Amino acid sequence: MGRAVPVVLQRASSYRLFAKGLLPLQRHGPDQAATLARLLGRRTTERRTMKVGSLVFTTDQGLSYLAKDFYDNGVITDVMVIRHGRRKEHSDWYPGAPVIGNMKSQYADMMRFVESMDVMLYFETPFVWDLLRLRPSALMVMHECMPDPLTVQPTAIFCPSLLDLQCYKGGSTPATFIPVPVNVPWKQRHRARVFVHNAGNGGLNGRNGTKEFVEAIKLVRSPAQFVLRMQEHQNIGNLSSLGVRVIQGTQPSESLYDGDVFVFPEKFNGLSLPLQEAYASGMLVMATDRFPNDTYLPIAPLLPTSGSKRARVAGRCREFDEAIISPKTIAELIDLWYDMDISEFNELGREWAKTMSWVQLRPRYMEELRRLVISW
């Protein structure tokens, strides 16, 4: 008669988690834990942290900030920095992290880094698609920028917006909607008097609607104040003659949303960090009335579109609907909302932000990443 198998070993998922050092022994009885520890050569007090790796830029761009937030909040444990070469980089973001200056000549180093991780989390691109084959991987997609079809399938697709989920659900790779957490301070606001637009780095194919915003200012009749923020100089005309306060350069997140109303007539996007942050900070958000903005932003201040057209950002990328926004519509909405009481919207933003905190959403990311390690 064979030796009885401990009950805990009959639970395959728990066993695999334990074997990879990702499940605390304390979840089992002391005898079961001791048995497993002897079989695996581990001490019963040991619990190894899951190694979550990522390949990242360190520039003043959305993907760089996104990866940094996931690192700072303990989802990503290890990074390999990819040199950008054309933009200013922050060498102090990841002290001691390995750096890749030439992906072709240093591909072996990239492989070794990936193979040393339990799971990889990539943001929009793995830089070298074959790396997806080496370890379990989650790819956070930005549908408008992805090759169609994907060059290599990841283990799982993380969708930061419902529009991304709409694009990828039902495919051969499991797709999961997990919002990106928001971490900006909330500020009390009362009346709609200062209208802010974030031009950023110009926006891919002009998607931030900066040109339309500037044209709209010329049509505004109310005495609204305007602030235009940009990270890099952009040739968008003489704004000083329009009384627009222009702030150029990288700004701390808490100072990006100092006004009362955030005007962002974006033409396409799934995830929009500026919209999420502006809403969480307590601003009235005047964004384009399109999916998925209409699933979480208050409807009343949204900008009606004049239609849409099919577009791509590049030949191999996925096709999408690009909204058409009239500067006249933007101006009319600014005049409509000028000096109105926005206290209710201010409070709505604060309540929404509570559901989007790292405290609320980090466990979901960790659970999904552990699931990939188990199933690999």
Image (tube, helix red, strand yellow):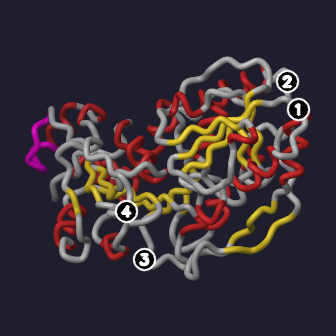
- C-alpha span from label 4 to label 3: 27 Å
| Residue ID for mark 3 | 152
- C-alpha span from label 4 to label 1: 41 Å
Q: Residues within 10 Å of mark 4 (few under 14, many from 20)?
A: few
**Marks 1, 2: nearer the viewer:** 1
Q: Amino acid at mark 1?
A: Ser
Question: Where residue 331 sits in the image (x, y, percent)?
Answer: 86, 44
Q: Residues within 10 Å of mark 2 (few under 14, many from 20)?
A: some
Q: Give the residue drawn at x 50%, y 62%.
A: 157
| Numbered disc 4: secondary structure | loop
| Residue ID for mark 2 | 339
| Residue ID for mark 1 | 222
Q: Quadrant of the N terminus?
A: bottom left
**Is residue 311 toward the left or the right of residue 26 in the image?**
right
Q: Amino acid at mark 3?
A: Val
Question: Where residue 65 sits in the image (x, y, percent)?
Answer: 44, 46
Q: Amino acid at mark 4?
A: Arg
Question: Where residue 280 sits in the image (x, y, percent)?
Answer: 63, 31
Q: Earlier in the sequence, mark 3 or mark 2?
A: 3
Give the residues drawn in magenta, as a range: 36-44
> Depth check: 73 or 203 in front?
203
Circles 1 and 2, Cβ within 8 Å, touching? The answer is yes
| Residue ID for mark 4 | 86
Q: Is residue 6 covered in magenta?
A: no
| Numbered disc 3: secondary structure | loop
**Is residue 175 toward the left or the right of residue 227 in the image?**
left
Observer able to see residue 7: no
